[in-house]
Amino acid sequence: MPEGPSIVILKELTESFVGKKVIAASGNTKKIEIEKIKGKTIRNFKSWGKHFLICFDSFALRIHFLMFGSYRINEGKDAVPRLSMKFKKGELNFYACSIKEITDNLDKVYDWTGDVMNAGWDAKKAKEKLKQHPDMLVCDALLSQDIFAGVGNIIKNEVLYRIKVHPETRVGHLPVKKRNEMVKEAVTYSFEFLKWKKEYTLKQHWLAHNKKYCMRCELPFTRKHLGKFNRRTFFCTNCQVLYQ
């Protein structure tokens, strides 16, 4: 599942299609009226968390890549696209994703201050939201798109390892200093993720995700599926503190 930084990269890669008219559209999606797109001009692309937004004059399309979604720019692949848009020069193809039409103003639909990659990100709001969920596990809190839009499983694992917090710690048990560190590091790591992803070096920088040993303690990592999201979690029981 693409995380927020990957969606920001997609937004940057598609900027050349802003102002371009869709001359043909097809796909196997049943969620939108494909004919409605034909002849329409793309006005903008936006990202919110893991959502990629294609903006037209009176509506927008929300693309969510789920677990196995993908895209191709100016080429296709050996699969039927969920949505394909062709332009006078170029094409955009989306596969195995969820597509939804949004007719409301996007500023009413999305809280841009909750997106860790957005210039309007509000750390204070995130801290207030965390206070409202004292019984939530920190591994779930980081994956909550209502609090940290754009944070995914890789970022979750790396942030908790960096700040030395056990993933099964409850938010209400976190010392204020650690809670502040978690909020700050979620943003810091997301932008580092973006940089490394563009350099094709992301995996080289992983310290916890998919790793077998803790580089600090030289002990085996514990690997479990944790929390309500049941996502793969890698952590060191020696240096990542379980606050109680």
Image (tube, grey):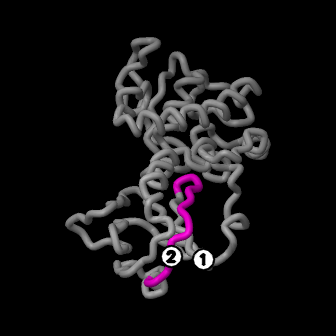
Neighbours of disc 1 within 10 Å: few (<14), some (14-19), many (20+): few
Q: Which residue is mark 2?
A: 41
Residue segment shown in magenta? 38-50
Residue 82, visible in the rendered structure: yes
Q: Is residue 193 magenta?
A: no
Measured as percent of width and height from the top left, residue 139 is found at: 57, 39
Q: Is 116 situated above or below 30?
A: above
Q: Residue at x 56, y 49 (%)?
A: 228
Of the residues shown, which amino acid type is indicated by label 1? Asp
- Mark 2 and mark 1 lie on one chain; the one further toward the N terminus is 2
Q: Which residue is mark 1?
A: 57
Q: Nearer the viewer, residue 53 or 39?
A: 39
Neighbours of disc 2 within 10 Å: few (<14), some (14-19), many (20+): some
- Quarter location, residue 56: bottom right
Query: Circle 1 sits in a helix, a strand or a loop, which is it?
Result: loop
Q: Is 82 situated above or below 217?
A: below
Of the residues shown, which amino acid type is indicated by label 2? Thr
